[in-house]
Image: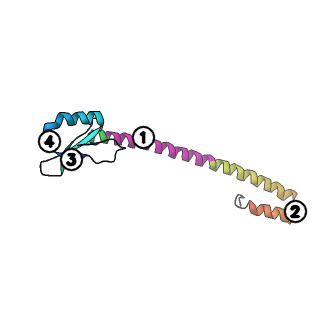
Amino acid sequence: MAAPALAHRTDPPRALPLREVRTRLTQLVALAELTDTVTVVTRDGDPRPVAAIVPASAARTAAQARADAERVAAVTAGWARRLEELHRQSSRRHAAELRAVTDALAEVWAELDRRVPAADPALARLRAAHADLLRD
């Protein structure tokens, strides 16, 4: 007769002609209420659906759907703003920490240049490894 409207069921709802729905309306409404089944109503002789009998929990108006979509969009936009702000804060912290490390490394290299002869091969390898962090 009619198929359940629950998400875990994959059976399509069965269509019933309007004449049969008129005679069995009380039964179909009880069926929808108790078992969450959907019954599609067609005009007699025309297989195209014109209405449906659905459980009240499944019936949603366009206004309700729009309100839900707007609420989800607002919540999503709020989270996106929060994430963007956290990203900016993290970038600023990272830049500040990188500047501090670069400044400290420059001080260390200045001291090494004063204490170690420039021709030392170990010092040259170390300087090459730090080249991307050393300021000109």
Name the side, left or right, on which 38 lies relative to 93.
Answer: left
User: Is label 3 or label 2 in front?
Assistant: 3
Front position among marks 1 and 3? 3
Q: How many residues crowd around disc 4 within 10 Å: few (fewer than 14), some, or many (20 or more)?
A: few
Looking at the image, do the residues carrying marks 3 and 2 touch, with CB atoms under 8 Å apart? no
Residue to which mark 1 is pinned: 75
Residue range (magenta): 67-93
Picture quadrant of residue 19: top left
- Which residue is disc 2 drawn over? 117
Percent x, y for residue 91? 59, 49
* Image colouring: rainbow
Considering only order in the chain, which callout, 2 or 4, is on the residue closer to the N terminus? Answer: 4
Q: Amino acid at mark 1?
A: Val
| Separation of marks 1 and 2 at Cα, in angstroms | 62 Å
SS at circle 4: helix
Cα separation, mark 4 vs mark 2, equals 102 Å
- For the residues labelled 4 and 3, say whether their Cβ atoms are less than 8 Å apart: no
Q: Is residue 90 magenta?
A: yes
Q: Position of residue 104 (x, y in %)?
A: 75, 50
Q: Position of residue 28 (x, y in %)?
A: 21, 37
Q: Which residue is mark 3?
A: 15
Residue that badge 4 annotates: 20
Disc 3 on helix, strand or loop? strand
Which quarter shows the N terminus?
top left
